[in-house]
Amino acid sequence: MPLPDQSDLIAANERLTQEADAANEKATKATAELAEANTALAKVTAERDQAAADLVTVKASVASLTKQLEDSKAAEKAATEEATKLKGEKVEFEKAVAAKVAEMGISANAAPKDNPAAKPTAGTGPLSTCNAMSHAERNQFIRDGGKISD
């Protein structure tokens, strides 16, 4: 095999130097891209960890709010039951009042509510007239200084 001459060696050396430079450039670029990828990975990992922590907080909040909702529903049910009970007691009370009024011989229509002339003004009014008034009318009569006489 013949020995290469100097010009062939110089040409081969230049070609290999260019290839080495290109390979080093690619390696440097790849190293930079790897560093960027590692930075992005660290950021995504931190975001994932934060999202996991947030999820735990949200789950705790949902559990707390679910408990509050259940408590509110139970309180609403109890209030509804109490209102129903009170309505029943009101009906019984009104029946008892009506029976007492009838027992006393007082007519429920003694003073029609729609006749202003039949309603007493401030002063003293008989019990029968006051019983014929609505609750609001009696309160207004008393606020105006009226007194109920027996």
Image (cartoon, rainbow, N blue to C red):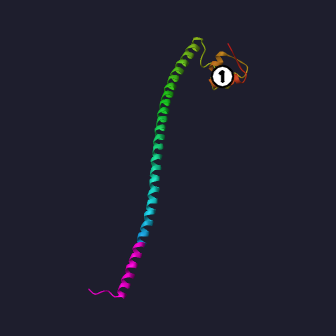
The residue that mark 1 highlights is 138
Does residue 20 belong to the magenta stretch?
yes
Q: Amino acid at mark 1?
A: Arg
Position of 120 with respect to 24 (left or right) is right
Q: Nearer the viewer, residue 96 or 117?
A: 96
| Most distant residue in the left direction | 1
Position of 53 with respect to 15 (left or right) is right
CA neighbours of label 1 inside 10 A, class few (<14), some (14 to 19), many (20+): many
Instruction: Estimate the x, y position of residue 34 in percent, counting from the top left.
Output: 42, 63
Q: Nearer the viewer, residue 130 or 92?
A: 92
Q: Quadrant of the N terminus?
A: bottom left
Q: Is residue 19 depicted above or below 80 in this figure? A: below
Q: For the point 62% across and 20% down, which residue is it?
A: 132
Does residue 130 belong to the magenta stretch?
no
Number of numbered callouts drawn: 1
Look at the numbered disc 1 and give the secondary structure of its residue.
helix
Q: Nearer the viewer, residue 90 or 110?
A: 90
Instruction: Estimate the x, y position of residue 40 in percent, counting from the top left.
Output: 45, 59
Instruction: Estimate the x, y position of residue 13 in percent, counting from the top left.
Output: 38, 81
Name the image quarter holding residue 14: bottom left
Q: For the point 43% across and 61% down, which residue is it?
A: 37
Q: For the point 45% across and 55% down, which residue is it?
A: 44
Q: Main secondary structure of the magenta part?
A: helix
Instruction: Estimate the x, y position of residue 106 in percent, counting from the top left.
Output: 61, 14
Q: Is residue 19 depicted above or below 59 in this figure? A: below
**Residues in magenta?**
1-24
Q: For the point 64% across and 16% down, which residue is it?
A: 128
Q: Quadrant of the C terminus?
A: top right
